[in-house]
Image (tube, rainbow, N blue to C red):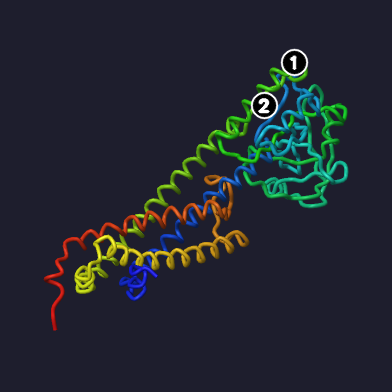
Amino acid sequence: MKAERFISRKLTFQGNIAAVAIAVSFFVIIVAVAVSSGFRNTIRDGVAAMTGDIRIEPLATGDGEPVPMPRHLPSEEALRALPGVVDITPAAVRAGIVKSGEVIHGVVVKGLERQDSTLCVSIPSRLAEITGLGVGDPLTIYFIGERLRVRKFTVSQVHRDLLEMDDNLFVYANLEDIQRLNGWSGEEVSCLEVRVRNAARQAVDGLTGQIGHILLNSGHEEEVNLYVSSAVHTYPQVFDWLDLLDFNVLVILLLMTVVAGFNMISGLLIMLLRNIPLIGTLKTLGMSDRSIGKVFVQSGAVTVFKGMVAGNVLALLFCLVQGTTHLIPLDPENYFVSWVPVHVSLPGILLADVSAYLMILLLLWLPTRMIARIDPARTVKAD
């Protein structure tokens, strides 16, 4: 065992306030990382449910009638082979008007490959509140085009939209029902939605460009007239808000690390001042200033590690409670969701822990510079 480690184990770090500050700082850091990841995943899922991460649709528009595209593209295999592409799913979309009693509200009816019976739909909880409809109730939707079409559906499910806003009320129906409504065959859809593994802005933009390049240069006529768009460009304000949130989390991480570091510096200074005779003795025995500094830094590092573990445990417990109970609510008009979302990303938490831990250890070396100024002739006294 090295002398520095042996001596550091015999020392008791002075400063309970510093230890508590370490635990609180790591608690705030982990919660901030979990909330940031929660917002990104939750809002990404909400946007993907509406438009997909990347959307392939016809470039032409009809006179009030939706324009179909092939359900299966000649280049589909090449698109699925792109790194980062998880799935490509067909969808049929049609705007409609819901009328329930005296309530009239616009909706977007999206046909997906569902397992429900025909003419069954899932409505958002916001629409259920507006219309007073519930599971099992009939729902009449009017579709306006060249001629008015009316369909009577049955509400089979009330889902919670992750982005519940009055102008984004999506009703989910069976793909076949919307295809029949539009007069299409089973091989015609409104769009293809591409789900990607990494929903970061740069990753989505890069894949959007690659998909557009493949379709444009495929040589197939049915693919040249297709338009590729991403959720980043469809909802830029949402992703700008997420980028701002990530920046705020980075600021919180730095501030909490600095606060914890300076609290540890205070505790280490107290420890150094109380052990000046010991420092003089170690110098007399021939130990270098750097080795003596390691003694005190290692003692402080143990306190930092214990505070980090305590802060992590408390933060993960908080995330568990918030994730299961949605204890802390939010205003969806300002935050897009109605509760504080949390997502425990182990790589993100480990990165935050290691980064903060190393930065605090670097800060701990600052007070050890006073060791060089201690004169053993003045501090070591003979009996």
- Can you tell which quarter of the image residue 346 is in? bottom right
- The three-letter amino acid code for the residue at tag 1 is Gly
Q: Is residue 342 visible?
A: no
Neighbor class of circle 2 (other Cα within 10 Å; few <14, some 14-19, many 20+) is many
- Can you tell which quarter of the image residue 356 is in? bottom left
Q: Residue furthest left?
A: 378
Q: Is residue 252 left or right of residue 64?
A: left
- Quadrant (top left, top right, bottom left, bottom right) of the C terminus: bottom left
Residue 73 x, y percent position in the rendering: 78, 25
Upstream in sequence: badge 1 or badge 2:
2
- Residue occupying image coordinates x 84% and y 31%: 179
Residue closer to the observer: 227 or 111: 227
Residue 280 x, y percent position in the rendering: 19, 70
Instruction: Tell me the CA gap for discs 1 and 2.
Output: 14 Å
Q: Which mark is residue 169?
A: none
Residue 266 x, y percent position in the rendering: 27, 64
Residue under label 1, please give it: 219
- Residue occupying image coordinates x 33% and y 70%: 3
Residue under label 2, please give it: 211
- Residue occupying image coordinates x 74% and y 31%: 192
